Amino acid sequence: MNTSRRAWLWALACVLGSWACSKKTPPAPPERTVSVVVTTDAPGVVRLDTLAWTPRGIERLVERGPHRVELKLLSDGVKDFELSAEGACKERPVLTNETTLHIKLKPLFTVAGGQQLTQLGYDTPFTLMVDSGCDETKQGPILWRIEQGANLNLNISQNGRLVSGRTPTLESLHGPVGAPGLLTASPRTSARTVLSATWDDGKRKLTQVFILAAQTRQSGLPSLARGHRVWLAGAWKVAERPKGSRAESTSADAYSALLPDALGRWLLNGPNNTSLELNVGVHGEGLLDCGRADCHREIAQHALKSPMTTVFQRGITAKLGSYNTACVSGCHTTGELGVDDGGYDSVLGSFGLHATLPQGPDAFHQLPRDLRRVSGVTCTGCHGPGAIPAPTAAWAILRSDVCATCHDFPPRYEHVVRYATTRMARSPSRPALRRAPCNGCHTTSGFLTRIGASSKERTAPDEFQHGLSCQTCHAAHAAETDQHLLRRPRLPDGFPSVKPDTPGLRLCVSCHSAEASGSGQATLLYASTDKAAAPHSGLSCTDCHGARESDPRGASHDFVVRTSVCLRCHEPPAIEKHTDKGRIADRAAALWKKRVRLPLPTPQRPAHALALSQEARLLSLILDDHGAAAHNAPYARALLDALENELPFP
């Protein structure tokens, strides 16, 4: 090509290029997007907050919540797309021309009936059937285990996919038929059982926890929650019911059952022309009324600071160390599992939230207001969600059965079963002990009235007398309590000022001192002579009584002193020399017969209950105290020496 032609083509290219460059580049065609909305029908199993997807880099996260996740996908050229979440089967959705794609993640496996079956009934067969959500969980066994509670004699078949059993009989848990009326039910007496089912193929694993019970927990108060089936001793029939209700009681053997289906007042007629008024409500609705200025404002203020009221808040805000918000539901919160009673579990489900909640400093205040209201052990958790019980039923709140709804679940919580072995927990058999002045130490109501914790005495009918209950020592919303909710009554007049003022000391002294009641174990314990101080004056009663090193919670409540406790301070030979138990008791008995000339005191006829001379009252410090030699052997010997030799009393 000659030079002139080459120059001409070059000039043409420059002209054309200049014209093309002067034009705007046309816009590229828009990328096609599709909204992928992911939900699940099993929020209690599938953790949508763990949702993951592949491939990455082609999506934009629009929303992530516990019950809904939305993604915007750049779908052009995408062939394989996979969704996965903890507890869920993997999904590989097919992208179509639709602008929105709805996907429900299936759980790896489910069990017919749900995870809380808390009203199975007594002596009732049950079956749990496992449904595999996807092919991968159809392979391999599902392993079942009783984590806690009653032995249901499980029959496991089909590689763990079929489980059957039978709940215990009512009599085996509650004992013989008692006085007609509402039956109480703790986790122990309701046959509550915690089961776990685990599938594991080596790559993925899912463990589900199930709670089974014959009935919901019941405190025995006639203030009930809607949907809670209650059992009653004796044959009872519904005489009056709220408008719209169709519920009827059912009777079997010596018991009756009723499932309230409406809010309001119920009246039941029972044996021997007795009647029972029940009030049915829902948790959460009446809580704001409790602390009104014209109701229980001061009590509500104290309750707000109670360890029970705040336990869930402290746990979820990481102030209690390791805390499982799913595990504590039903004890650290208000209401029953698996029942639409307006409690924590019911409200949690209404918001579609998973029982395992995120934790952190702001976690509690990020919860919905209605859920916060029933978090923790609130007023209705103990008093019930119905209207205030009639005055004739006010005594029931003082029974240990109210506390047993949480603190009676061996082998982890043994407060109630241990305390039931003590003489304090047994019903005062003699009517005189239920009257003043004896009731000030022998009944809960009398004690609370005596120390000023109650303005009026709430006397229980004779058939429901249970001795001293949990409420004698523990106060849920008193002004002065410690982390164990122990009351702090003042020391009796004349009792020596003792240190340290350790938990429980004031409570024990308020009854077990000669200054308060005549029963002088504490008086003897802290008494001293001119020659020596009391050997145990630096200790509190509970440092020895019920002291434990590593036992289940509540094991201390039997208040038994074990030799191992003495060995913390004393060598074995020194214990025998220090106490001289037999010799001290024999000397005191001989002096009583010689000088007082009355029958020896017995537990049924203690010396402190008699009108005695000063000499006899001093002897009663030893004779009424079976642990006198261990409590203060030096003083006991000095006192006996003085009485035997007619010397001034030490």
Image (cartoon, rainbow, N blue to C red):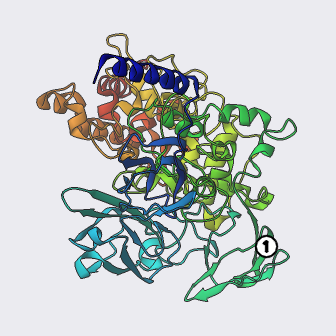
Q: Tell me where residue 364 appears, x and y as whole percent.
A: 58, 36
Q: Is residue 567 shown left or right of residue 135?
A: left
Q: Tell me where residue 330 appears, x and y as whole percent.
A: 52, 54
Is residue 278 shown above or below 633? below
Q: Is residue 602 visible to us here? A: no
Is residue 8 shown above or below 45? above
In what quadrant of the picture does the N terminus appear? top left
Q: Tell me where residue 525 appears, x and y as whole percent.
A: 40, 27
Name the residue carrying label 1: 266
- Front-most of residues 95 and 222: 95
Q: Is residue 593 shown left or right of residue 629?
A: right
Q: Residue furthest right?
A: 294
Q: Is residue 333 shown left or right of residue 282?
A: left
Determine the image quadrant of residue 340. Answer: bottom right
- Front-most of residues 548 and 335: 335
- State the SS at label 1: strand
The residue positioned 28% from the left and 63% from the top of the image is 198
Is residue 329 shown above or below 338? above
The amino acid sitting under disc 1 is Trp
In what quadrant of the picture does the C terminus appear? top left
- Front-most of residues 493 and 426: 426
Q: Tell me where residue 576 appears, x and y as whole percent.
A: 17, 33
**Neighbour class for label 1 at 10 Å: few (<14), some, many (≥20)?**
some
The residue positioned 53% from the left and 27% from the top of the image is 20
- Front-most of residues 28 and 184: 28
Q: Is residue 224 visible to us here? A: yes
Determine the image quadrant of residue 269. Answer: bottom right
